[in-house]
Image (tube, grey):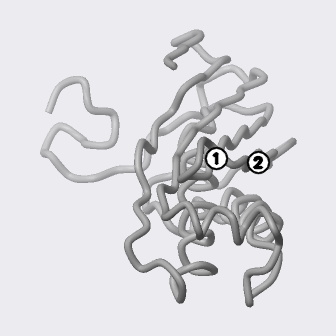
Amino acid sequence: MSGLTHFDAAGNAVMVDVSGKAETVREATARARVTMQPSTLAMIRAGTAKKGDVLGVARLAGIMAAKRTADLIPLCHPLPLSAVTLELAPDGEDGVEISATVKTTGRTGVEMEALTAASVAALTVYDMCKAVDRGMRVDGLRVVAKSGGKSGDFRQE
């Protein structure tokens, strides 16, 4: 199991000991896209969804999810987050693009928090619109940027 930090020599899952790492400013951005029927996106744009402001509620859900990541992912460290921002915007005629950026000063990164925020925001869009469009898809969940820590910066578009 060499190279995988969440396993000990016997192959058992462990929480990584980060006590020897330096505290640095760390930031990560994750993205996802919800693909839907053009009429569903038109409803979101018009603000006429029966459950309310789809993008506003999804933004709040993503922020809340980032703060709860350690409760959901077994080996994640609970982190004091400095900032969580979500951008949700119509993309083309058939989708919503979601970008979640999370920041902390700590000993471990916030990639999982950014991924959790983006995915829960996407799931919230689905939940709020599923009555009119069960064929929606959540696609392309990925980390697109990361900074801070020993491994340095990472960028992917």
Q: Position of residue 129 (x, y in %)?
A: 59, 78
Asked if the residues shown at circle 1 and circle 2 are in contact, with their CB atoms under 8 angstroms apart, the answer is yes
Mark found first going from the N terminus, 1 or 2 = 2
Residue at (72%, 38%) from the top-left corner? 101
Secondary structure of residue under mark 1: strand
Task: Identify the residue at the far right of this view.
Answer: 82
Residue at 73% across, 50% down: 88
Q: Quadrant of residue 61?
A: bottom right
Q: Where residue 15 appears, x then y in whole percent?
A: 43, 49
Tell me: residue 91, above or below residue 122: above
Q: Which residue is mark 1?
A: 98
Foreground of the two, 147 or 105: 147
Q: Residue at x 51, y 56 (%)?
A: 34
Q: Residues within 10 Å of mark 1 (few under 14, many from 20)?
A: many
Q: Quadrant of the N terminus?
A: top left
Residue 122, located in which quarter of the rendered image?
A: bottom right
Q: Is residue 114 above or below residue 129?
A: above
Foreground residue, 118 or 76? 118
Q: Amino acid at mark 2?
A: Leu
* Front position in the image: 2 or 135: 135
Q: CA distance from mark 1 to mark 2?
A: 7 Å
Residue at mark 2? 86
Front tag of 1 and 2:
1
Q: Residue at x 69, y 49 (%)?
A: 90
